[in-house]
Image (spheres, grey):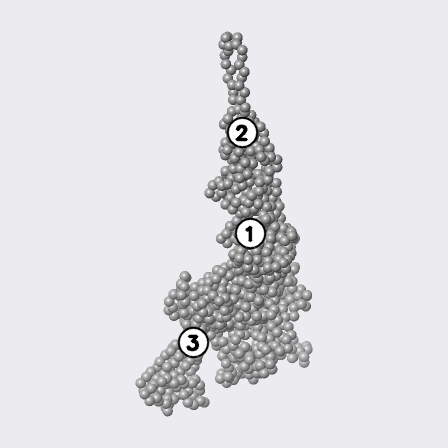
C-alpha cells in the first residue's frame, strides 16, 4: 500500500479524536513529525508482510501443479493446399504434413496437419437453394467475397413451369396475333380440365421476343373447344430457344400447379378479305383495283403475279383468292392503205368492196402456278381451272386451295409466289379480231386453319431448368405430364463445382457466422448416374453452428450433369429442420476447398546412449516448451529387443518404470539405479524419446503467414492460411494460476453456479473472458425446461467464429464430464454471445475547426473503447453478457474524457435480424435476449462550428 494512503488514514483517525489538530505533510511540529513517522513505519511493515504472503502464496500454488490441467496450449488454425492449376488428379495430403511460418522475429514456426485429405483443383461456382413448399428456387453465382445465407431463399425466384410452342414459319408476316389454341386430351373430362386451367389466372400466355423479353396476352378466353388469344397490333419476331429458331408461344404456371396431361396441341388462325400486298403484270406493278391479267388485247404468255407476305406464307392453311371476273371486248382491224385512182377507172363502175368477218379471240388456256422451293408448279389439278377465262366463268369468283408445304419463302422485290399465265388463245394472230379480255376487279386473299389446325414444329416443357422435348410424344398421341416439381421436398442447398470432387476425403471449409447458434440438421448427397446418393461426412461445423471443416468421402462415380442451368458436379445439403426462420440461418462468408486443420506442434524423435546403467541420468532434449512426450527404453527379452514405454511421474512417490521430464526446459531425468531389475542391454541406443513442442503466443500468426510446405508433395502449387491462427500462449501466469486454484477450491471439480462454470471452462480453454449461464433457456433466449445454455466470450473473438469453433468441442466435453448437467437430464447448448453491431453518430459543437480532425479521431477511438466487450464500459472492465450499453452511458463517458466536448446530439442504432433499428427505450423493452452483447460497428463524428 502506498505511503500517502497510510497518512490519509492516520489523519482521518486523528480528526475523529482531536478535531482541532491540523496535519501538514512534512511539517516540523511534533504532531506532523509523529504522523509521518507512524505512516512510514506502517507502510514499510505492510510492504514486508505482503512480500511474505506473496512468497507463501507461490509456494501454495505450487502444491496444485499435479492437479491443474493445461488448457488449449498450442496455436491452431487452418491452411489451404492448392494443387497445380489444371491438374486433374488427386494430391494426397497425409496426417502430420508439415507447413512452416515465420514469426515476428524471423523464427521458424512449424505446424502439423491434424488430419489427412486429398486435394484437387476444384472450386465452387454455383449456389442454388430450393424450397418446394414455398415454390422457390434461388440461384446465384458463388463469389468468395460475397457472403450468403445457408439455406436462405431471399433473392430472385427462378422457379419455372413453362410450356413452349415453337412455330418455324406460322407467324411470318402477321401484323397481329389472333389465334386459337386447340388441345387434345384423353377424354372429355381431361380436356375440360386443360381448357379451364389454360384460361384461369393461374396460367399466363405470352410470346417470346428476341431481346429476351416477352409480350403477355392480356386475355386468354374460352372459344368453344379452344383458347382464344389476341395481341393487336403486334408484329411477332423470331427468337432462339436452345438450338432452334422460330416463333415461341409460352404458357407459364404462375399460381397453383395441377397435374395436367396433354395428348396433342394445335393452333388455328384466319384472315378474311385482305388485299394482296403486291400485284405485277408482266413484271410491272399494278396499283389499280381493276386490271387485265393478260393485257388488252390478249398477249400470249402474259402473266399476272400475286404476292402477299402474310397470306402466302400460311403453309398447310386453306387459302382463298376472291375477285370479280368481267370481260371487255377489244377489236383489232388491219390498216387499209389509200390508192391513187386512174382516169379510166373513174369512168368505170366502182367495184363492191370485200367484207371480212372479224375472228373472236378467247383465253382458252390459262394456268395457275405457285413458286415452290425448286421452281414454278401447277396450283390446281382441275382442268376447268385452266379455261375459266374463256368466258365460261363470270361474276364473283373464289379460288380455294391448300397452301403447299413447299411454297417458297417470301422475298422482298422477288418474283412473287402465285401467278396466272396465258398459254393458249385461238385466233390470237388473226386480223381483224375481237378480243374478249378478262378483267379482274378487287382481288382479296383469305386464309384459315380451321379445317386443319397447325401443329407446333416443336414442343418443350421447362420445369425448373429441367427441359424435356415432348414433340414426338405428342405426335404419337401419348399422354404427357406438362408441369411437375423437380425440387427436393425439404429445403435443399446445392453447390456446383467446375470439376469432380471425388476424393477420400474431400475437404470443404465453411467460414460461418451463426450468432443464433441454431444448428441445421442436414444430410449430404452427391450427384451420380443414378441421381443423388448419400455421402459419408465428418462435420466439424456441428450443423453450420460455427466455422470448420466438412470432410466428404465422395466416390469416383460422381458425374457431370446440367442442373439448374449449370453444367458441372454437384453436392447438395438437405435441411431436416422443421422451421427455417431466415434471420436464424447461418451466414456463410466463404467456402474454401482443400483446407486442413493444423496445430503448432513440432514432433521430433531422438535416441540416446547410456554410458553407465547404474548412475542417475540427465538428458537435455533438443526442444523446450513441450506439449507431450513419449519416453521408451530398450529391453532385451530373449533374442528379441523391444522399446518399452516409461511413464512420466515423480520417482520419489511412484515406482516401476518411471522417469521425470521438465516440459518447460526439456530436461529428462532418470534416478540412480532406475534401470536395475530391467533387462536393459549395454549397447544402445537404449533410450528413445518422441517429443513435441509449440511456439506459444508467437505462433498466433496473422492470415497469409503460413506459406512454405515443410513436407515435399508432388503437384502442390502452394499453401497458405486464409485466417489467423489462435490459441497459442506462453503458459500459466501467477495470476491465472491463482484464479484457477481458487476456482478448484470453490467448485471441487463440480460446476453448479455461473462462477464455477467459468472456472471449469477456463481450465478447458485458455483465453475465456466471460461466461453467461442460463438454466431452462434455449440458444435464442426462450424458455425451454430441459435446456441449459452457456454463452462463452473468448479473448480472440474478433478473429472470427472459427476461434470459438476451435475450442467449443473440448469445452463441451469438459462440462459434460464434470458438471451435473448429464445427471439432471439437461441438454447443454454452448454458444457465443449474440453479437449486435452498434453504430454511433455524434454531433459536436466547436467554436472553430482548429484540431477538428484530432478531436474526431479521439472521439471515434473512445466510442470503440466504450463498446469493446472486453475493455469497455465506464470502468474499463468490459460488459457482461446480456448487458447492452445505452446512449446516455456513452454520452457521459465521452463528456468525462473529452474536455469541452460540446456534444449536441447523438444517435445510436443496432443491426438486429438484418435491419438497422434505433436504440431507444423501446429497443431495450423489446430486447429480452440474455446472451446479447454489443460490438463496435460503423461510427461517424460530425464537427459543427457554432456561429459567433
Q: Nearer the viewer, residue 475 or 831?
A: 475
Q: Earlier in the sequence, mark 3 or mark 1?
A: 1
Which structural element holds mark 1? loop
Q: Nearer the viewer, residue 218 or 124?
A: 218
Circle 3/circle 1 CB separation < 8 Å: no
Which corner quadrant holds the N terminus?
bottom right
For the residues labelled 1 and 2, the Cα–Cα distance comes to 48 Å
* Lower sequence index among marks 1 and 2: 2
Say if 86 sits above or below 802 in the image. above
Q: Eyeballing the image, is 934 above or below 342?
A: below
State the residue at coordinates (50%, 85%): 63
Residue position marked by numbered label 1 in the rendering: 455
Left or right of residue 884, residue 610 in this image: left
Per the image, label 3 sits on a secondary structure element best described as strand
Asked if labels 3 and 2 touch by Cβ distance under 8 angstroms, the answer is no
- At 53% across and 24% down in the image, what residue appears? 432
Q: Nearer the viewer, residue 842 or 685?
A: 685
Amino acid at each position: 500500500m502506498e505511503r500517502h494512503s497510510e497518512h490519509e488514514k492516520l489523519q482521518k483517525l486523528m480528526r475523529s479524536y482531536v478535531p482541532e489538530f491540523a496535519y501538514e505533510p512534512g511539517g516540523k511540529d511534533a504532531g506532523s513529525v509523529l504522523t509521518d513517522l507512524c505512516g512510514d513505519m506502517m507502510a514499510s511493515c505492510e510492504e514486508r508482510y505482503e512480500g511474505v504472503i506473496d512468497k507463501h502464496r507461490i509456494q501454495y500454488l505450487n502444491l496444485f501443479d499435479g492437479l491443474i490441467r493445461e488448457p488449449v496450449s498450442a496455436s491452431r488454425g487452418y491452411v489451404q493446399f492448392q494443387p497445380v492449376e489444371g491438374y486433374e488428379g488427386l494430391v494426397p495430403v497425409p496426417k502430420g504434413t508439415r507447413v512452416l511460418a515465420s514469426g515476428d522475429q524471423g523464427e521458424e514456426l512449424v505446424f502439423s496437419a491434424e488430419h489427412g485429405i486429398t486435394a484437387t483443383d476444384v472450386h465452387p461456382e454455383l449456389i442454388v437453394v430450393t424450397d418446394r413448399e414455398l415454390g422457390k428456387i434461388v440461384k446465384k453465382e458463388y463469389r468468395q467475397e460475397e457472403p450468403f445465407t445457408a439455406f436462405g431463399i431471399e433473392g430472385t425466384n427462378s422457379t419455372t413451369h413453362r410450356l413452349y410452342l415453337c412455330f418455324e414459319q406460322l407467324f411470318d408476316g402477321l401484323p397481329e396475333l389472333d389465334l386459337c389454341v386447340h388441345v387434345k386430351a384423353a377424354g372429355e373430362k381431361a380436356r375440360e380440365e386443360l381448357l379451364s386451367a389454360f384460361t384461369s389466372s393461374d396460367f399466363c400466355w405470352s410470346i417470346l421476343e428476341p431481346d429476351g423479353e416477352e409480350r403477355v396476352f392480356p386475355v386468354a378466353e374460352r372459344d368453344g373447344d379452344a383458347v382464344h388469344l389476341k395481341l393487336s397490333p403486334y408484329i411477332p419476331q423470331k427468337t432462339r430457344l436452345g438450338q432452334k429458331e422460330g416463333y415461341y408461344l409460352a404458357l407459364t404456371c404462375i399460381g397453383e400447379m395441377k397435374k395436367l396431361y396433354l395428348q396433342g396441341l394445335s393452333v388455328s388462325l384466319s384472315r378474311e378479305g385482305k388485299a394482296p400486298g403486291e400485284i405485277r403484270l408482266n413484271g410491272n406493278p399494278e396499283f389499280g383495283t381493276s386490271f387485265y391479267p393478260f393485257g388488252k388485247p390478249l398477249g400470249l404468255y402474259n402473266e399476272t403475279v400475286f404476292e402477299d407476305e402474310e397470306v402466302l406464307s400460311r403453309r398447310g392453311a386453306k387459302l382463298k383468292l376472291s375477285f370479280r371476273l368481267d370481260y371487255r371486248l377489244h377489236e383489232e382491224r388491219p390498216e387499209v392503205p389509200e390508192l391513187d385512182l386512174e382516169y379510166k377507172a373513174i369512168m368505170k363502175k366502182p367495184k363492191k368492196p370485200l367484207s371480212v368477218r372479224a375472228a373472236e379471240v378467247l383465253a382458252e388456256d390459262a394456268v395457275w402456278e405457285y413458286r415452290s422451293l425448286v421452281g414454278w408448279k401447277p396450283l390446281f389439278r382441275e382442268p376447268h381451272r385452266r379455261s375459266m377465262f374463256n368466258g365460261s366463268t363470270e361474276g364473283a369468283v373464289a379460288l380455294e386451295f391448300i397452301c403447299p408445304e413447299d411454297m417458297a419463302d417470301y422475298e422482298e422485290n422477288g418474283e412473287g409466289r402465285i401467278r396466272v399465265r396465258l398459254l393458249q388463245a385461238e385466233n390470237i394472230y388473226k386480223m381483224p379480231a375481237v378480243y374478249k379480255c378478262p378483267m379482274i376487279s378487287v382481288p382479296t386473299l383469305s386464309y384459315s386453319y380451321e379445317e386443319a389446325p397447325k401443329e407446333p414444329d416443336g414442343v418443350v416443357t421447362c420445369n425448373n431448368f429441367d427441359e424435356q422435348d415432348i414433340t414426338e410424344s405428342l405426335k404419337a398421341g401419348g399422354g404427357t405430364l406438362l408441369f411437375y416439381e423437380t425440387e427436393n421436398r425439404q429445403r435443399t442447398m446445392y453447390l456446383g463445382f467446375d470439376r469432380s470432387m471425388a476424393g477420400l476425403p474431400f475437404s470443404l471449409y465453411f467460414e460461418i457466422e451463426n450468432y443464433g447458434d441454431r444448428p441445421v440438421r442436414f444430410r449430404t448427397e452427391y450427384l451420380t448416374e443414378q441421381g443423388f446418393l448419400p455421402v459419408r461426412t465428418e462435420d466439424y461445423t456441428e450443423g453450420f453452428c460455427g466455422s470448420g471443416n466438412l470432410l466428404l468421402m465422395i466416390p469416383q462415380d460422381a458425374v457431370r450433369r446440367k442442373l439448374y442451368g449449370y453444367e458441372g458436379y454437384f453436392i447438395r445439403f438437405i435441411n431436416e429442420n422443421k422451421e427455417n426462420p431466415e434471420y436464424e440461418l447461418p451466414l456463410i462468408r466463404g467456402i474454401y476447398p482443400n483446407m486442413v486443420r493444423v496445430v503448432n506442434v513440432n514432433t521430433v524423435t531422438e535416441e540416446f546412449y547410456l554410458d553407465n546403467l547404474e548412475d542417475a541420468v540427465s538428458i537435455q532434449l533438443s526442444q523446450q516448451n513441450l506439449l507431450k512426450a513419449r519416453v521408451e527404453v530398450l529391453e532385451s527379452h530373449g533374442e528379441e529387443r523391444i522399446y518399452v514405454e516409461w511413464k512420466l511421474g515423480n520417482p520419489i512417490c511412484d515406482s516401476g518404470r518411471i522417469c521425470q521430464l521438465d516440459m518447460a526446459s526439456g530436461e529428462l531425468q532418470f534416478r540412480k539405479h532406475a534401470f536395475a531389475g530391467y533387462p536393459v542391454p549395454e549397447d544402445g541406443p537404449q533410450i528413445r524419446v518422441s517429443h513435441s513442442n509449440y511456439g506459444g503466443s508467437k505462433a498466433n500468426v496473422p492470415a497469409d503467414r503460413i506459406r512454405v510446405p515443410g513436407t515435399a508433395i508432388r503437384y502442390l502449387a502452394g499453401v497458405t492460411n486464409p485466417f489467423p491462427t489462435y490459441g497459442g500462449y506462453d503458459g500459466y501466469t501467477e495470476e491465472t494460476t491463482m484464479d484457477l486454484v481458487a476456482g478448484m477450491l470453490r467448485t471441487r471439480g463440480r460446476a453448479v453456479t455461473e462462477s464455477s462454470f467459468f472456472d471449469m471452462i477456463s481450465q478447458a480453454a485458455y483465453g475465456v473472458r466471460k461466461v453467461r449461464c442460463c438454466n431452462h433457456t434455449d440458444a435464442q433466449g426462450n424458455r425451454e425446461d430441459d435446456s441449459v445454455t452457456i454463452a462463452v466470450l473468448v479473448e480472440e473473438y474478433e478473429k472470427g467464429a472459427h476461434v470459438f469453433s476451435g475450442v467449443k468441442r473440448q469445452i463441451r466435453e469438459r462440462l459434460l464430464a464434470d458438471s451435473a448437467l448429464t445427471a439432471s437430464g439437461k441438454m447443454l447448448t454452448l454458444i457465443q454471445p449474440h453479437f449486435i453491431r452498434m453504430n454511433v453518430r455524434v454531433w459536436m459543437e466547436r467554436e472553430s475547426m482548429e484540431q477538428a480532425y484530432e478531436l474526431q479521431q479521439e472521439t471515434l477511438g473512445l466510442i470503440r473503447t466504450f463498446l469493446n466487450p472486453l475493455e469497455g464500459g465506464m470502468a474499463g472492465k468490459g460488459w457482461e453478457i446480456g448487458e447492452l450499453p445505452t446512449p446516455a452511458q456513452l454520452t457521459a463517458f465521452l463528456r468525462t474524457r473529452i474536455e469541452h466536448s460540446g456534444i449536441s446530439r447523438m444517435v445510436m442504432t443496432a443491426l438486429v435480424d438484418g435491419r438497422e433499428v434505433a436504440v431507444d427505450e423501446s429497443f431495450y423493452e423489446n430486447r429480452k435476449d440474455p446472451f446479447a452483447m454489443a460490438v463496435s460497428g460503423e461510427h461517424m463524428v460530425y464537427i459543427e462550428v457554432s456561429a459567433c
